[in-house]
């Protein structure tokens, strides 16, 4: 609508079978550019544009929002990775 595009991409990155190196990354994208990113290793939001820096500061000052983002590593990433890993193991 009106030529603007907003999306949010969350991804889980890991390489070990025990998920000890798993990282949750949540990207906020405007017009194909990431302007805010949450990284579970860093534990906070980082802004990449003027608007992103302002919003990241607001998000980081909200303990509830940080707690939700940090919890997604367990509830979203590890939960789904365990399901996928068991599905693959069951087929071998």
Image (tube, helix red, strand yellow):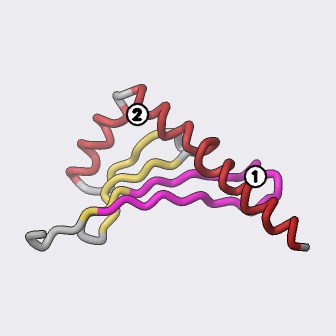
Tell me residue 11's x, y (percent). Answer: 53, 60
In space, the residues marked 2 and 1 are separated at their CA atoms by: 24 Å
Secondary element type, mark 2: helix
Q: In this view, does 42 lie to the left or right of 3?
A: right
The answer to which image quadrant residue 84 occupies is bottom right
Tell me residue 32's x, y (percent). Answer: 30, 71
Tell me residue 81's x, y (percent). Answer: 70, 57
Secondary element type, mark 1: loop
Counting other residues with Cα less than 10 Å from the Cα at mark 1, is it few (<14), some (14-19), or many (20 or more)? some
Relative to 16, say whether 32 is above or below. Answer: below
Q: Is residue 32 left or right of residue 16?
A: left
Residue furthest out toward the right: 92
Tag 1 residue = 19
In this figure, what is the number of numbered marks? 2
Mark 2 or mark 1: which comes first in sequence?
Answer: 1
Residue furthest out toward the left: 2
Counting other residues with Cα less than 10 Å from the Cα at mark 2, is it few (<14), some (14-19), or many (20 or more)? some
Instruction: Read off the magenta span.
Output: 7-27
Disc marking residue 65: 2
Relative to 9, say whether 79 is above or below. Answer: above
**Residue name at image x 21 percent, y 50 percent:** 51
Q: Quadrant of the image for the N terminus? A: bottom left
13 within the magenta span? yes
**Residue name at image x 64 percent, y 42 percent:** 74
* Mark 2 touches mark 1? (CB < 8 Å): no
**Residue name at image x 82 percent, y 58 percent:** 17
Disc marking residue 32: none
Tell me residue 22's x, y (percent). Answer: 68, 52
Relative to 66, say whether 34 is above or below. Answer: below
**Residue name at image x 16 percent, y 68 percent:** 4
Q: Quadrant of the image for the C terminus? A: bottom right
């Amino acid at each position: 609508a009106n030529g603007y595009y907003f999306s949010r991409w969350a991804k889980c990155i890991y390489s070990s079978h025990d998920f000890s190196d798993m990282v949750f990354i949540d990207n906020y994208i405007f017009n194909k550019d990431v302007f805010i990113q949450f990284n579970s290793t860093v534990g906070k939001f980082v802004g990449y544009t003027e608007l992103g820096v302002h919003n990241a500061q607001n998000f980081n000052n909200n303990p509830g929002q940080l707690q939700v983002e940090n919890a997604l590593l367990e509830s979203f990433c590890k939960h789904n990775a365990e399901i996928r890993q068991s599905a693959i193991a069951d087929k071998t």
